[in-house]
């Protein structure tokens, strides 16, 4: 890491204030061009610990940058991750305040509800499926507290991997009952189709990202816990949404997930 602990803590405090005030701060890499990915995860961890100290509770984790195209666009060769607090989880059909987020976009994903812990360093796709209670369709609301222009992966990870919220569907499926790779989705905004995708676009199988995360956590002396919900990565491009937009995503065999931004 190139940043000292005091600098990382100061950036984490700036991000916490930006979240509270719905504000955008200058890019970290504009101010600290030598900042590394390790620095960015340390900043995210400092921000997370501040939130936990204030009484927020972890609901699960998100995985991002699971497609080769997005990895190439950001100059990183592996996915990234962030934390999800329980006050950011919405049920399908919810009305969501658009003004609570910045640079609002939607991604189409599957979420894995764990019934057993997952721990590296050798966690496999099969381990993930065995530890999963059920899989549920979900939409991720992307949010950014760091200016978008010129942003790098260091900025994104520091900003909790651009996670804002999750909208969870009603249909639960056991992983042994369906080939998760072939779950397809149609994403609509105000009735017009905007994006389509198939879950195999996430690292050839959406559970692969969860295994990656368990192994990554092991490097930090941590593990994924039973009861956590793991958002496994998008298999569509981000779709921009504005105040007043109604979003509906139809999943083959899993019903739909919908929300409206007010």
Image (tube, rainbow, N blue to C red):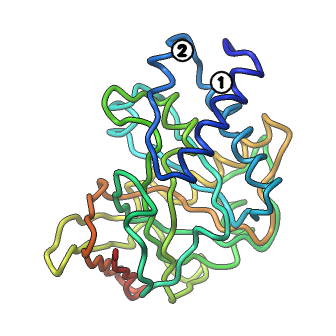
Question: Tag 2's secondary structure?
Answer: loop
* Disc 2 to disc 1, C-alpha distance: 10 Å
In the displayed structure image, the side of residue 254 where residue 13 appears, left or right: right
Q: Quadrant of the C terminus?
A: bottom left
**Which label lies toward us, 2 or 1?**
2
Q: Quadrant of residue 37?
A: top right
Nearer to us in this view, 43 or 140: 43
> Quick one: which residue is furthest to the front in this view?
21
Circle number at residue 150: none
Residue of label 2: 32
Residue of label 1: 39
Q: Is residue 76 visible?
A: yes
Circles 2, 1 touching at the beta carbon (< 8 Å): yes
Residue at (42%, 72%) from the top-left corner? 97
Residue 72 drawn above or below residue 248: above
Nearer to us in this view, 83 or 179: 83
Residue at (66%, 36%) from the top-left corner? 12
Q: Position of residue 245 (x, y in %)?
A: 25, 74
Q: Position of residue 115 (x, y in %)?
A: 77, 74
In the displayed structure image, the side of residue 108 where residue 121 appears, left or right: right
Question: Tag 1's secondary structure?
Answer: helix
């Amino acid at each position: 890491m190139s940043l000292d602990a005091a600098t990382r803590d100061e950036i984490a405090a700036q991000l916490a204030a930006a979240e509270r005030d719905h504000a955008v701060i200058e890019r970290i890499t504009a101010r600290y061009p030598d900042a590394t990915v390790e620095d960015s995860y340390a900043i995210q961890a400092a921000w997370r610990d501040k939130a936990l100290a204030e009484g927020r509770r972890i609901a699960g984790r998100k995985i991002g940058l699971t497609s080769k195209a997005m990895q190439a666009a950001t100059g990183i060769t592996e996915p990234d991750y962030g934390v999800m607090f329980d006050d950011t989880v919405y049920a399908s059909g919810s009305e969501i305040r658009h003004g609570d987020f910045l640079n609002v976009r939607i991604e189409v994903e599957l979420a894995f509800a764990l019934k057993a812990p997952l721990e590296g360093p050798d966690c496999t796709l099969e381990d993930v499926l065995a530890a999963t209670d059920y899989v549920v369709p979900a939409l991720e609301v992307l949010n950014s507290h760091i200016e978008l222009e010129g942003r790098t992966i260091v900025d994104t990870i520091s900003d909790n991997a651009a996670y804002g919220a999750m909208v969870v569907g009603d249909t639960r499926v056991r992983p042994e009952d369906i080939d998760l790779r072939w779950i397809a989705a149609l994403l609509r905004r105000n009735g017009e189709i905007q994006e389509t995708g198939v879950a195999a676009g996430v690292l050839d199988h959406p559970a692969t990202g969860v295994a990656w995360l368990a192994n990554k956590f092991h490097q930090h002396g941590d593990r994924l816990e039973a009861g956590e919900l793991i958002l496994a990565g998008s298999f569509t491009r981000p779709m921009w949404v504005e105040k007043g937009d109604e979003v509906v995503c139809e999943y083959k065999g899993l019903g739909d997930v919908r929300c409206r931004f007010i």
